[in-house]
Amino acid sequence: MFCLLAETSFHNLQELRHNASLANKVFIQRDYSEGTTCKFQTKFPSELESRIERTLFEDTVKTLNNYYTEAEKIGGQSYLEGCLACATAYLIFLCMETRYEKVLKKIAKYIQEQNEKIYAPRGLLITDPIERGMRVIEISIYEDRGSSGCSSGSSSVSSSTAR
Amino acid sequence: MPTSAGKRFKPTKYIPVSTAATLLVGSTTLFFVFTCPWLAKVISPLVPLYNGLVFLFVLANFSMATFMDPGVYPRADEDEDKDDDFRAPLYKNVEIKGIQVRMKWCATCHFYRPPRCSHCSVCDNCVEDFDHHCPWVNNCIGRRNYRYFFLFLLSLSVHMLGVFTFGLIFVLHHREKLGALHTTITLVVMCIAGLFFIPVMGLTGFHMVLVARGRTTNEQVTGKFRGGVNPFTKGCCGNVEYVLCSPLGPRYIFDPRKKPHIKIQPPFIRPDPSERQITIKVNDNGIHGTIISSKVSFFWNAEMADSILLIPTSTVFDFLCLDCTAESSLSGKTHPSTPAMYKFRPSFGTMPKVHYHTAGDKIVMPDDQTSQAILEEGVRGHDYRSEPNLDLPEYTNAPLHRTFKSSPFQLDSDPVNSRTLSLKQAQQRSEKGHLVGLQPKTVNSTPYKNIFSPNTLSNRNGSLSYDSLLNPSSTPPAASECLAHRGMPPVGFHSPYLPTKMCHMREPEMQRQQVAPTYSPVMSSRGVGRQSPHLRDRDSSPVRYDNLSQTIMASIQERKEMEAREKRHMLHGHSQTHIYAQDSGVFEGSGGYGLPPNPCYPDGPHCAGSRGPTPPVYGGSRDNLMGVGPSYGQRTPVLCQTGSTLGRAPRTSSGSLHTDHISSNNNHGRVSGPEGLYRSPAHHPRSPAMPRSPSYSHQKLSYMSAQERMDSPRLEAMKVNGQMDCHPSAKGVTASPNRHGNVKKVTGVGGTTYEISV
């Protein structure tokens, strides 16, 4: 019983705590001014004006742009990769991940870190653009909908007791 | 091969690929079995090896072209397209390297197709860098697999060539045994190779040309760049390199299981001034009501930006733009309310933009900021604190007044400096209601700042001009004072008044520097600040308005000073300079010139006319307020205009325009003495121009036009670059009498109308 109660209270707490609801989404579009290379616009969207400092946002987007530029760079490493792939009849792709994939992993890690450190505390969440086909960076804006845990808490109580 | 979800299995679409695969593998196998042994024996064992390698290459590329995701875009979420789906135009233009490229809305995938993307009807997907749908591989050829397709074509051509050649050698050596199995099979293989040789070679050649030109099949076939320029080309070598050596593109199909879970829990951190809402009540008396028509919004969001009137005074903005958020909100969207304002992007960088609501509009501004602002700006607040004028209460009472508790005005796109200053300061100032004629940091910007004179004074960033204006000695206290003032948003934005007043004030300020004490208490506290401009070059120093009463007094004072200056002008015939610059800041809009004198006055004599309303506004206001050179606070930043109106500075609206631009140049106190003062309104460097709302000018337009016409000839003489010639002053003298008839009506910050006889 105690466990149940504890669980219930925990649920209450959870409910109370997780009371941020998705309010809006902002989409940062691609910047095609330099062709089809992957680059996002650094223009600060107005919806975020009250949520995050401009510099932080711009830093994030610029870093992402740099990552993408690095991934798409045609240089020594890409030559090597291509030759190796040809030589092995592309079997190398089965065992080794490409340069782009490596950078994408770095980007995913960076975005997660940014989310945890900067955006989530401000009620924002950046979605990795790869999920959107690298067409947009989606930033979800959450609002604090206040304490709404009571009712859910009670329901969890009832559900737990029912068990 | 990527397949769309829900597609039925259609065997027919696999026929070409099956045929191609069968032919390829089958023929080659036969070749190896029946022809190669003899070739290895007779010619060289390298022959089968070579052929084997080539065939392996063909197969690998064929497999990659067939099974690799070409770059399929996943369908867009509903969230993404909710704005676009129903009301969106079919095409969206984007500029790529200077060339307009059209992006079409894809109804299936719910997004605007990126450049070079196309929707494949067979695969029912949008594919990145869509080339074509190849039935032989039953796959789209797009960004990711184009290289493999191209290499497949190349290697197949080579392979076919090799097979045909070696088969021919075999057959030629076995002419007498054509009926033999080996020979027959070799002949068959040769026939197949020969049969497909032409199409394959043709396709290979075609794609080689495409690669060299940097085009896709889709673009070539639809004739997109026929006769035009291809924005995607990187030059022949660059294109080849791009096709062959670029890294393998990413797959856009994301595995949701890999997505990390991030917890979002309130409370959320918010950037400083951010969503505070300040309620600003704008009162407008009859005079100003008509003038100020632009909407004032003090929100720190996009809306604010839209409706923010650019006011040169940094003070206001400093106040508003406390931090980058403010800036971003505003700067990101600085839309000057009037075209004029654009021009006058504050040289000093901090031009608050304020839109004025029509009378009675309520502007909601974050409340928190007020208190916070005060706290933060405590240090600086002394300026306005000490000044009794233009306290909020006064404003609220005065119909004309626009009381803004805080003015989140943000300087036009100029980030930071002035802006950050303040919200807080603005708040404080607004409460105090004094005019802060501080000029935002730069000398040039004076006039604008003045609009918000009472509050704008504190330009945190230390508008240079203003500081200089106020504290010529640039003593720290003075500077801080100035800053403080600047920070304060003009309590009201009596924008209508401010400009005028400020203009007026400025001049008197300068002159007042010596006579600072004469001002009301406000002045005294600010006097120090005020002094500076005077001591320094006046041009750009923004004038501060202390408060209503002060303004009036100031205007009177100014008038006297202007008269004195006039005399001096006549004596010296100074060069024009930035009178406007100087003036603008200080004057409170009498009559609501809050709006900047119209930033657009670059043209000379035509300013008045061409610019449209603004210039005249100021001019008019000036005239009203100041007869000959009365420095009413009313001088609008537009100074240019005011200058003309003042009469002293013969500037017509055009003049003012010039001055606005020029004033920036004039920062360094070009204005000499009294003349400068006169000019200031007109000369006022850009700043005045900035925030003026056209509405103001509108009203005055008619009024001014006459004046301007008078002045325009004179102004023409004036250089655009802020070097106002002496004419203005001299002419101003002549002009002024016209304008300043017997009685001038001056509208104070509180909305009170004063009649001042000139």
Image (cartoon, coloured by chain):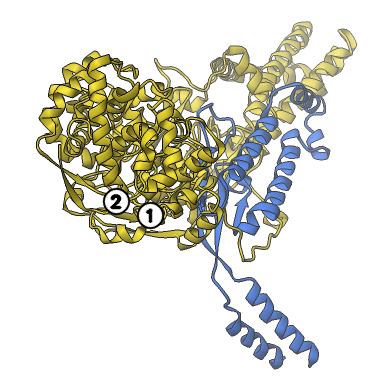
Chain colours: A blue, B yellow
Q: Nearer the viewer, residue B138 or B14?
A: B138
The x, y position of residue B224, in whole percent, is: 42, 24
Q: Quadrant of residue B229?
A: top left
**What is the quadrant of the N terminus of chain B in the image?**
top right
**What is the quadrant of the C terminus of chain B in the image?**
top left
Q: Give the structural element (helix, strand or loop) at label 2.
A: helix
Question: B711 above or below A25?
Answer: above
Where does label 1 land, which residue? Answer: B388
Q: Nearer the viewer, residue B757 or B220?
A: B757
The x, y position of residue B124, in whole percent, is: 51, 45
C-alpha distance separating marks 2 and 1: 9 Å
Q: Quadrant of residue B533?
A: top left
* Residue at mark 2 shares a chain with residue at mark 1: yes
Give the letter of the chain under mark 2: B
Where does label 2 land, which residue? Answer: B549
Residue B317 visible? The answer is no
Q: Nearer the viewer, residue B291 or B385?
A: B385
Q: Residue at x 73, y 18 (%)?
A: B184
